[in-house]
Image: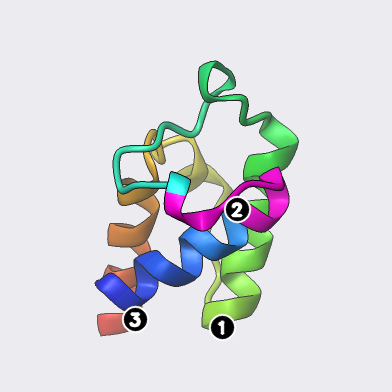
Amino acid sequence: MKLVFKKVAGILAEILGIDDEDITMNTKLNRQEGITALDVAKLIIGCEQTFGITIQDEEVHKFQRVGDLVAYIKKLREV
């Protein structure tokens, strides 16, 4: 799970132009954190490319925090 988190944090940090150490599992994926819908879309695409997975559009709204996305990716990779 730690490796998945590090990769997701790296992708998000690059999108936002911040240090990946500023991202935690509890970082919220919303406007209050300065993360736009476009940023989330870029994050999803980056994760799909990095992990070789497909994240269904109807699942994206369920990702409230970085940890939610990490858990989803981990679950997909176990199947």
**Image location (x, y in percent) of residue 30:** 53, 25
**Image location (x, y in percent) of residue 75:** 27, 70
- Residue 79, can we see it? no
Residue in the image at 48% along x and 35% along y: 61
State the mark number for residue 77: 3
Residue 19 covered by magenta stretch: yes
Mark 2 vs mark 1, CA separation in Å: 20 Å
Task: Describe the element under mark 2 as helix, strand or loop.
Answer: helix
**Image location (x, y in percent) of residue 19:** 57, 52
The magenta segment is 13-21
State the mark number for residue 33: none
Residue 77 covered by magenta stretch: no
Residue in the image at 27% along x and 72% along y: 2
In primary-sequence order, the first of circles 3 and 2 is: 2
Q: Which residue is mark 1?
A: 52
Above or below 42: residue 52: below
Q: What secondary structure prevails in the magenta region? A: helix
Task: Describe the element under mark 1 as helix, strand or loop.
Answer: loop
Residue in the image at 62% along x and 42% along y: 40
Mark 3 vs mark 2, CA separation in Å: 23 Å
Task: Describe the element under mark 3 as helix, strand or loop.
Answer: helix
Residue in the image at 52% along x and 76% along y: 53
Q: Are marks 2 and 1 in contact (CB under 8 Å)?
A: no
**Image location (x, y in percent) of residue 54:** 55, 70
In which quadrant of the rendered image does the N terminus lie? bottom left
In primary-sequence order, the first of circles 2 and 1 is: 2
In which quadrant of the rendered image does the C terminus lie? bottom left
